[in-house]
Image (cartoon, rainbow, N blue to C red):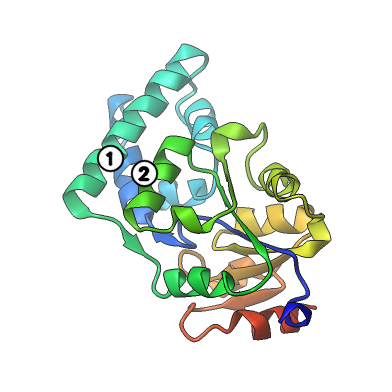
Amino acid sequence: MATDIPFKAVIFDMDGTLIASTEADYLAWKRLFAEYGIDLTFENYFPLLGKKSADVTKYQLHLTGDDVAEALQKKLVYFDEVIAENGIQLIPYADVLVKSVKQYPVKMALATSSRKHKMEKVMKLVGLLSYFDVTVSGNEIENGKPAPDIFIEAAERLQVSADECVVFEDAASGVQAAKAAGMKCVAITTTHPAEALQQADMVIDSFEGVDFAQLCQKLK
C-alpha cells in the first residue's frame, strides 16, 4: 500500500474544511464587534475567513497589547455560547475522509488559524481530534495565512519535508499559504467559489466519494 501514496503527510485546515463553523464564527465576531460600535455584516466578515483571530482584533478593531487578549477571550466565550445553542457540524463526509487516511502510511496534521482552545473544543465535540498526529493553532505561529508559517510548522512537527505534504483547504488565503510553503493543495468549495481557489492543484466540490489514494495519484 505504501507505493500507492506519493506523500508522507496530509495537513487539514479546520474551519470550513472539516468543520462547518462559518456561521458560528461569524455570530461570535458580530457580538464582539458590536461591543466596539461596529455592525459586522457577513459581507464584511467573509474576507476575514482564515485570518488569525489576533490579527482581526489588531487590524479591524485597532486593538493592542492587553486589549487584544481581552477581546480574544470574549470572542471565545461568545463562540462557546453559539455552539452550545446551535451545536457544531462537520463538513459532509469530512470524517469519512479523515478516517480513511488512517489506513495509509501517512502522518496527519491539523493546521488552523483558530486558537488552540477553540480547536481542541470543536475537534473533541466532533470526535476527530485523536486522528491527528500533531496540531498547529493560529496562536502558535507568528504570521497567519496567506503566509506559509502554519504549514511549515506542521511539516516540521511531523518531521517531513514540504514537498512530501498535501494540504486540504477551503479559503483562498489558505491555498496561498500552502503553495507558498511548497506543498500540493486540494481546495474544497465549501466557503469560496472555485474561481477563487484556482491556485490550488485540485478543486473539489465535496468530500463525498473521494478516494484518498486516487486523489494523491492525480496530484503527483
Give the quadrant of the N terminus: bottom right
**175 up-or-down from 137: above or below:** below
Who's the residue at 54% across and 63% down the image? 170
Who's the residue at 36% across and 44% down the image? 121
Amino acid marked by disc 2? Lys
Question: Could you say whether the residue bearing mark 2 is in a helix, strand or loop?
Answer: helix
Who's the residue at 29% across and 45% down the image? 27
Numbered disc total: 2
Instruction: Classify residue 166 as left or right of residue 56.
Output: right
The residue lying toward the viewer, choosing from 17 and 7, is 7
Does the CB distance between marks 2 and 1 fall below 8 Å? yes
Question: Could you say whether the residue bearing mark 1 is in a helix, strand or loop?
Answer: helix
Amino acid marked by disc 1? Asp
Residue denoted by label 1: 80
Residue 213: quarter of image: bottom right
Residue 113: quarter of image: top right
Image position, residue 73 (x, y; %): 37, 26
Residue lying farthest to the top in this orientation: 66
**10 up-or-down from 5: above or below:** above
Distance of label 2 from label 1 (alpha carbons): 9 Å
